[in-house]
Image (cartoon, rainbow, N blue to C red):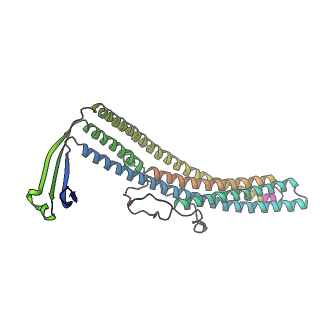
């Protein structure tokens, strides 16, 4: 530090006089980390940073999984809406056939009413599925950091429902614990809490510091370098926790309780991770079994529909059998599409449960979205 002072004086016999006084100097303190308090503080801060990084990785993994899930749902709703439109047209043709037979006197008005009612139900399904598709696309756009309608044009082209590949290797539990960011975050939080215990325990013991200072004073600027103007001081300082020992011991107990809390949280996170993997594996396996059965069901109902319609046209089948065959075929095809969506979603859930392969660090110093012109901000520069 440095500075000048202007000193003035007066007396009854002399005029006031003034002069400048120049001062400069600095001081430093070095604390001897005998009991590891500073080391534990730095260790806890490091673990806290690592836990925050894993929290970011967990958020990114969730975001990626949600994007994939809503994309699959959008494709599923689009495919089901297309099926509902095709089915409504087929129902309309059946209703037209029933009306012609009614006009010819070979069918009843009940057959016409049932056929038309079935047509309207399919058309109502189209409206509902279109609304669900729009909601999924809007949500997908928001997840990607764009407006709700940003992806409507891009997803307008019809695309198939994604088919999941072969199931990834689940691995042993130790691999799962290493790959999931939420587990790694919980472990880092436990390490941070453990380091804070060491910091609290170190506060129970004396702390020793070495303090040194040097300063110089002169009436002129050139006098600051003279040895006669330079003064220094150095010496140790000792701090003893004589009167707050009870408080410090209570802080150790608090740190230990927090450590136990994070240990329980880590154990719960590990068990949840294993549960997520097992549930996703079971769901994916069952969805694939259902796909095989529903594909066979669709083929059987398609054959039944063709036969019943041909027999009805020839006059050898009841119209109710035709309506039932149409309705069963539509239900089977729609169930197959829903199961395809469920299988793809189960595969996404399995990838998330296994950690998603997100094991590389994220550079958070370069944000993907620049937060400018979005409203008031806290001042960070002064």
Q: Can see residue 180? A: no
Q: For the N terminus, give its image quadrant.
A: bottom left
As drawn, the residue found furthest toward the front would be 13
Image coords of residue 358 (percent x, y): 41, 56
What x and y, as percent, mark residue 83? Answer: 67, 60
Please give left or right for residue 88 compared with residue 65 in the image. Answer: right
Indicate the position of residue 273 as horizontal and vertical percent values: 44, 45
Q: Nearer the viewer, residue 222 or 12?
A: 12
Q: Which residues are magenta?
A: 310-314
* Residue 64 or residue 189, whichever sits in front: 189
Q: Does the image show residue 231? A: yes
Q: Horizontally, is 133 left or right of 30 in the view?
A: right
Front residue (pair 175, 66):
66
Numbered-mark total:
0
Determine the image quadrant of residue 186: top left
Q: Residue furthest left?
A: 227
Quarter of the C terminus within the rendering:
bottom left
Q: Is residue 343 above or below residue 250?
A: below
Spot occupied by residue 283 in the image (x, y as percentages of width and height) = 53, 48
Q: Could you say which quadrant of the image residue 209 lies in?
A: top left
Residue 231 forms part of the magenta stretch: no
Residue at (40%, 39%) from the top-left corner? 267
Q: Is residue 204 above or below residue 79?
A: above
Principal SS element in the magenta part?
helix
Identity of the residue drawn at 45% across and 42% down: 272
Q: Is residue 70 left or right of residue 360?
A: right
**Residue 287 versus residue 77 in the image, above or below:** above
């Amino acid at each position: 530090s440095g500075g000048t002072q202007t000193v003035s004086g007066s007396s009854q016999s002399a005029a006031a006089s003034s002069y400048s006084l120049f001062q400069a100097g600095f001081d430093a303190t070095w604390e001897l980390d005998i009991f590891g308090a500073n080391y534990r503080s730095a260790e806890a801060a490091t673990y806290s940073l690592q836990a925050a990084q894993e929290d970011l990785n967990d958020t990114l993994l969730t975001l990626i999984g949600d994007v994939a899930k809503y994309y699959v749902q959008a494709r599923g709703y689009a495919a089901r809406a297309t099926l509902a439109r095709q089915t409504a047209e087929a129902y309309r043709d059946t209703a037209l056939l029933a009306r012609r037979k009614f006009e010819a006197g070979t069918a009843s008005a009940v057959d016409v009413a049932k056929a038309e009612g079935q047509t309207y139900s399919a058309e109502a399904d189209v409206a509902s599925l279109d609304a669900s598709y729009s909601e999924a696309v809007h949500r997908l756009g928001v997840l990607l950091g764009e407006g709700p309608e940003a992806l409507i044009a891009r997803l307008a082209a019809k695309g198939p429902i994604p088919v999941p590949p072969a199931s990834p290797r689940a691995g042993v539990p130790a691999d799962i614990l290493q790959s999931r960011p939420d587990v790694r975050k919980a472990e880092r939080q436990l390490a941070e809490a453990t380091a804070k215990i060491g910091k609290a325990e170190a506060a129970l013991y004396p702390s020793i510091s070495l303090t040194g200072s040097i300063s110089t004073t002169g009436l002129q600027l050139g006098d600051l370098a003279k040895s006669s103007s330079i003064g220094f001081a150095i010496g140790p300082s000792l701090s003893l926790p004589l009167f707050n020992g009870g408080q410090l011991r209570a802080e150790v107990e608090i740190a230990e309780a927090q450590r136990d809390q994070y240990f329980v949280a880590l154990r719960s996170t590990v068990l949840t991770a294993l549960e997520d993997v097992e549930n996703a594996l079971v769901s994916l396996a069952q969805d694939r079994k259902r796909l095989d059965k529903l594909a066979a069901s669709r083929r059987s109902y398609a054959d039944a529909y063709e036969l019943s319609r041909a027999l009805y046209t020839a006059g050898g089948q009841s119209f109710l059998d035709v309506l039932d065959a149409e309705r069963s075929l539509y239900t089977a095809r729609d169930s197959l599409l829903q199961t395809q969506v469920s299988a793809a979603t189960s595969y996404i859930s399995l990838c998330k449960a296994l950690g998603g392969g997100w094991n590389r660090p994220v550079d958070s110093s370069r944000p993907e979205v620049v937060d400018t012109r979005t409203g008031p901000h806290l001042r960070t520069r002064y």
